[in-house]
Image (cartoon, grey):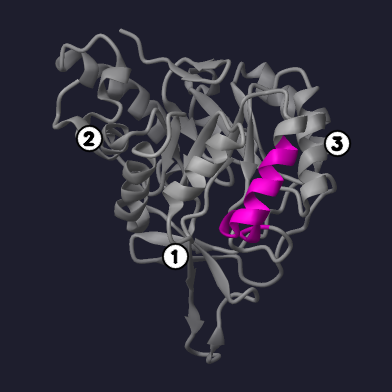
Amino acid sequence: MDVSVRIGSLTLKNPVTVASGTAGYGEELSVYIDLSKLGAVFTKGLSLKPREGNRGNRIAETSSGMLNSIGLENVGIDRFLSEKLPFLIGKKAVVIPNVAGHTVEENAELCRILSAAEGISALELNVSCPNVKEGGMAFGTNMRIFTGLLDEARKHARRPLIVKLSPNVTDIAEFAAAAEKCGADAVSAVNTYLGMKIDVGKKKPFFNNIVAGLSGPAIKPLALRAVYQIYEKVSIPVIGLGGIASLDDMLEFIMAGASAISIGTMNMINPRLSMELVDGLEEYIRAEKLSSARELVGIAHRGGKA
């Protein structure tokens, strides 16, 4: 059977990936799973210089999910290239760094540097982080800024370019279509939704940054709707993410139009989930007597017909 996925010039062996921000640089997850069996590993968001992230509280559990205000803490591009990338290459992982610069210029420079590095399969441009003050979500919610960033990033990206979309907009499909027009090879949908928490004891917001990113099973129906709408507006692949916790969740995203999926928050609940989904998808395709996983992509738009 064929479970491969094509993204620009890149072919993933299967559609199961682990999402940026929840998989670190693969080191912790490698204790539980074989990274080489994944479609890809999306690394933590990278900036040119090391970033400490937000001060104060960073994580809060919610009903069926979690809020995070990490602030894109990362080791910086130099340590990534000298320490983290060699580890991932040694594990034979397909490596897709998440590019999370503060400015248009920094994002362009990160795309240039990473494109020149051996072992990088694609780039994911983060235009949608809701818990940083510089750049972050502003890149993904203002169409003029969004397209300006993509135009510049595309000039410097010499690898397939994936754009991670913000759900905190009126029409996410409009931004997906704009990404395709700017030369993106795929879009990731979706990043976290804006949320917040009040510390009842202190009678003030729990996070220093006031708002935080909501993820986990709580957002799955919203993320699924976004993928369904995006699929109808673009011809490039959609990578679906947002609360995927089971084989049925993954199948829903694929049937809604996702060519691949990413496991996020659930990596911290069940670090073996991605491997279970790789095996589960193959079993499902065999049971359904399909020859390719691609027969399922967007099938819900066609009344259940391949």
Amino acid type at image mark 1: Glu
Look at the image and tell me whether residue 83 can be seen: no
Disc nearest the viewer among 2 and 1: 2
Amino acid type at image mark 3: Asp
Residue drawn at 30 percent across, 7 percent down: 1
Q: Earlier in the sequence, mark 3 or mark 1?
A: 1
Determine the CA span between mark 3 and mark 2.
45 Å
Residue drawn at 75 percent across, 23 percent down: 86
The range drawn in magenta is 136-153
Magenta stretch, main secondary structure class: helix
Look at the image and tell me whether residue 233 can be seen: yes
Please tell me whether residue 191 is drawn above or below residue 267 in the rendered image: below
Residue drawn at 61 percent across, 16 percent down: 92
Q: Is residue 103 left or right of residue 17?
A: right
**Residue 138 drawn in magenta:** yes
Please tell me whether residue 214 is drawn above or below residue 109 in the rendered image: below
Please tell me whether residue 99 is drawn above or below residue 209 in the rendered image: above
Which mark, by number, is residue 78? 3
Residue drawn at 36 percent across, 43 percent down: 227
Q: Is residue 284 left or right of residue 8?
A: left
Amino acid type at image mark 2: His
x, y (%) of residue 275?
Answer: 40, 26
Which mark, by number, is residue 149? none
Front residue of 55/96: it is 96
Examine the image and state in which quarter residue 114 appears.
top right
Determine the CA span between mark 3 and mark 1.
33 Å
Report helix, strand or loop for mark 3.
helix
Which mark, by number, is residue 301? 2
Determine the CA span between mark 2 and mark 1.
35 Å
x, y (%) of residue 167?
Answer: 46, 56
Which mark, by number, is residue 61? 1
